[in-house]
Image (cartoon, grey):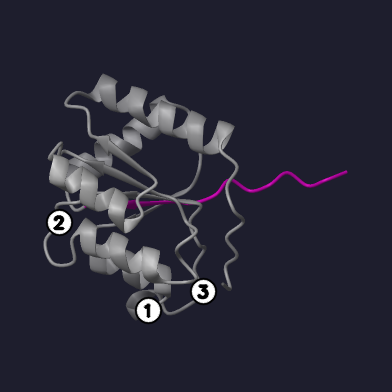
């Protein structure tokens, strides 16, 4: 009998602690049980993905990245660009989850290789619904590439 697959880790890249906590609460409400690793900056996310800095030991590659755009330092646009140009990372789907509805941000993110662009809902119920739809699509309908830890 085949062993059940482990749930893929979600990398949540969000600099705002309140938004991070609301997203985690919405995961629970939407019964999204995947493990979540939180990085509070684009630089921290890139270090995690590339196993650099405090992440120099082997880490689990995420099955999906939820990426905020507007962060100090390495913002989401730059992080997305680096991820999609890196051979070992570019297959990981990146969902932009941000407050911006600016058409220039949307265009740029898709040009850089974003898989989906979602404007963060303004209330918690909307966030729960959005997270539920992300779960249903990315882990219920979509067929994802296998991302190996040693790629």
Does dot 3 land on a helix, a strand or a loop?
Answer: loop
Contact between labelled residues 3 and 2, with CB atoms less than 8 Å apart: no
Q: Give left or right: position of 120 versus 30.
A: left
Q: Residue furthest top?
A: 125
Q: Is residue 147 magenta?
A: no
Relative to 71, say whether 126 is above or below. Answer: above
The percent coordinates of residue 102 (x first, y second) are 12, 40
Badge 3 is on which residue? 58
Badge 1 is on which residue? 52
Q: Give left or right: position of 79 versus 33.
A: left
Q: Give left or right: position of 78 versus 37.
A: left
Relative to 20, say whether 123 is above or below. Answer: above
Query: Nearer the N terminus, badge 1 or badge 2?
Result: 1
**Which segment did they paint magenta?**
1-14
Relative to 111, say whether 96 is above or below. Answer: above
Bin the neighbour count of mark 3 within 10 Å (Cα to Cα): few under 14, some 14-19, many 20 and up: few
> What quarter of the picture does the C terminus occupy?
bottom right
Viewer-side label of 1, 2? 2
Residue located 35% across and 76% down the image: 54
Q: Does the magenta stretch include residue 8?
A: yes
Q: Give left or right: position of 30 versus 41.
A: right
Badge 2 is on which residue? 71
What's the distance in space between the residues labelled 1 and 3, CA to CA?
A: 10 Å
Does dot 2 land on a helix, a strand or a loop?
Answer: loop
Query: Nearer the N terminus, badge 1 or badge 3?
Result: 1
Residue located 47% across and 33% down the image: 135
The percent coordinates of residue 30 (x first, y second) are 43, 26
Query: Nearer the N terminus, badge 2 or badge 3?
Result: 3
């Amino acid at each position: 009998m085949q062993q059940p697959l482990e749930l893929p880790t979600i990398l949540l890249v969000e600099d705002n602690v309140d938004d991070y906590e609301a997203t985690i609460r919405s995961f629970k409400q939407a019964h999204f049980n995947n493990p979540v690793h939180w990085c509070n900056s684009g630089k921290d996310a890139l270090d995690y993905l590339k196993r650099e800095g405090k992440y120099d030991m082997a880490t689990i590659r995420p099955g999906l990245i939820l990426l905020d755009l507007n962060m100090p330092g390495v913002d989401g646009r730059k992080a997305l660009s680096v991820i999609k140009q890196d051979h070992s990372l570019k297959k990981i789907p990146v969902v932009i989850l941000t407050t911006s509805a600016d058409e220039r941000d949307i265009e740029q993110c898709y040009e850089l290789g974003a898989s989906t662009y979602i404007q963060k809902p303004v209330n918690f119920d909307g966030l729960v619904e959005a997270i539920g739809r992300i779960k249903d699509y990315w882990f219920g309908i979509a067929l994802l590439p296998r991302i190996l830890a040693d790629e």
